[in-house]
Image (spheres, grey):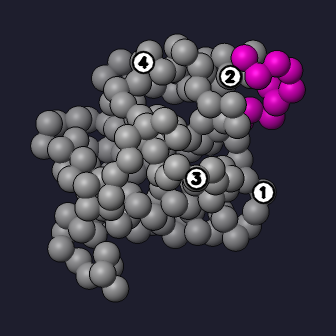
Amino acid sequence: MKIKVILIGKTTDDAIRQIEADYEKRIKRYTGFEYGHIDNSSIRSGPEQVIRQKEGELILKKLTPSDHLILMDDKGKMYTSVKFSEEIANWMNTSKKTVVLVIGGAYGFSEDVKQRANGMISLSQMTFSHQIVRVILLEQIYRAFTILNNEPYHHA
């Protein structure tokens, strides 16, 4: 199984980029992993609905028909770290070829993207900046694989 994380927008914060690169390297020890950004710099102004729609079109262009799409959304299902690791194990056991986790833009996801999605996950009921959500998601993916492999990271 391969996991892809797609983010709307880029970060200019070197510290965040360094943490992202570290977790990307760690996750690749366990599974195929791809981490990418969608440039939304040309569509950041205008009505929220138009921005959401245009970002949605860019997201859908990145997908293949067989991708298992999971949206990171505050209305999604919440997991403990152990339950999230069990969900990843389920994806592996049900032969999902590619699971795509998407962190959307500031205004959320278009209806087209929501219709295409196979599920939604919430990392918290709190609101976090996109900079922090990136790091939290990557850390939880890494943590999940250490749990599945009975490694001490989860309790260290």
Q: Residue at x 69, y 31 (%)?
A: 107
Q: Could you tell whether 82 is left or right of 73 in the image? A: left
What's the distance in space between the residues labelled 1 and 4, CA to CA? 30 Å
Query: Of tags 1 and 3, which is closer to the observer?
Result: 3
Where residue 149 sits in the image (x, y, percent)? 19, 69
Compared with 134, 6 (above or below) is: above
What residue sits right under mark 1 in the picture? 12
| Residue at disc 2, secondary structure | helix
Around disc 3, counting alpha carbons within 10 Å, would you say few (fewer than 14), some (14 to 19), or many (20 or more)? Answer: few
Image label count: 4
Query: Of tags 1 and 4, which is closer to the observer?
Result: 4
Q: Is residue 56 visible?
A: yes
Where residue 77 sits in the image (x, y, percent)? 37, 41
Q: Is residue 4 visible?
A: no
User: Which residue is situated farthest in the front direction here?
Assistant: 125
What residue sits right under mark 4 in the picture? 116
Q: Amino acid at mark 3?
A: Met
Give the magenta part as a residue range.
39-49
Q: Residue at x 35, y 66 (%)?
A: 143
Q: Is residue 44 magenta?
A: yes
Q: Amino acid at mark 2?
A: Arg
- Labels 1 and 3 touching (C-beta < 8 A): no
| Residue at disc 3, secondary structure | loop
Q: Quadrant of residue 120?
A: top left
What's the distance in space between the residues labelled 1 and 3, CA to CA? 23 Å
Q: Amino acid at mark 1?
A: Thr
Task: Report the disc number at residue 126.
Answer: 3
Compared with 60, 142 (above or below) is: below
Mark before the other along the chain sequence, 1 or 4: 1
What residue sits right under mark 2 in the picture? 52
